[in-house]
Image (spheres, rainbow, N blue to C red):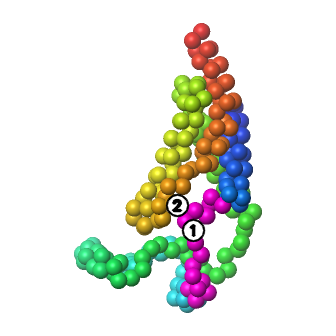
Amino acid sequence: MKILFTGILGGIVMFIWTSIAHMALLLGEAAVREIPNESAVLSAMQSNIAEQSGLYIFPGPGVGKNATRQEKNEAMKHMAEKMAASPSGILMYHAPGRPFALGKWLGIEFGTELLEAILVVFLLAQTRIVSSAGRVGFVLVTGILAAITTNLSYWNWYGFPGAYTAHPDHRFFSGGNCCCPSLAKARSHSLRTDNG
């Protein structure tokens, strides 16, 4: 119960700090820009992609879904030429009409951060770390591991900006540091009990 309570507390702090970081400090906008001449680009996307919402990569190999392995291998030989001559990237496209469900998105974000905090507190509780520096270090390393799992791959394969990739996972640092003091008391008590 102590772990669950501490995790919930950490999740709340993570959510509050994330909100401040995005809305007041603008950390969530690191390396993110608006498209120049957006209306023309959106019009072109709507005309060509229409209602087919999904995740797209461009330039594509141009072989279709049912291509054979040989056709795919042959297409890959020309990808360097296509990327040299054309823009490249990934696109998460939603057809017109997607509802602006801010309340729902915030709820999902809060639930996600709550789960993250509970999991990191659970992992920390399995250790015998009782020093403040050790607890902070554990939570920080956990956050870094979670971030580089996706961020470095996106930078490597899709060319995400370095500023986005290097952006620290401040949520774990803030939420974890809130969790650490109360969890340390519980761990210290547990260790004293174990040692008789």
The label shown at residue 164 is 2
Pointers 2 and 1 in contact (C-beta within 8 Å): yes
Q: Residue at x 56, y 85 (%)?
A: 41
Mark 1 lies on residue = 32
Q: Is residue 65 above or below residue 120?
A: below
Q: Is residue 186 above or below residue 152?
A: above
Task: Give the image location of residue 86, x and y in percent.
Answer: 39, 82
Give the class, few, some or many, for how many residues have Cα within 10 Å of label 2's Cα (few <14, many ≥20).
some
51 in magenta: no
Q: Residue at x 54, y 89 (%)?
A: 44
Residue located farthest toward the top when viewing the structure as drawn: 196
What is the total number of numbered labels drawn onto the structure image?
2
Taking the image as shown, residue 101 lies to the left or right of residue 191, namely: right
Task: Give the image location of residue 140, x and y in percent.
Answer: 55, 41
C-alpha separation, residue under disc 2 versus residue under disc 1: 8 Å
Give the class, few, some or many, for how many residues have Cα within 10 Å of label 1's Cα (few <14, many ≥20).
few
What kind of residue is marked 2?
Tyr
- Evaluate whether residue 71 shows in this view: no
- Label 2 secondary element: helix
- The magenta stretch is 26-42
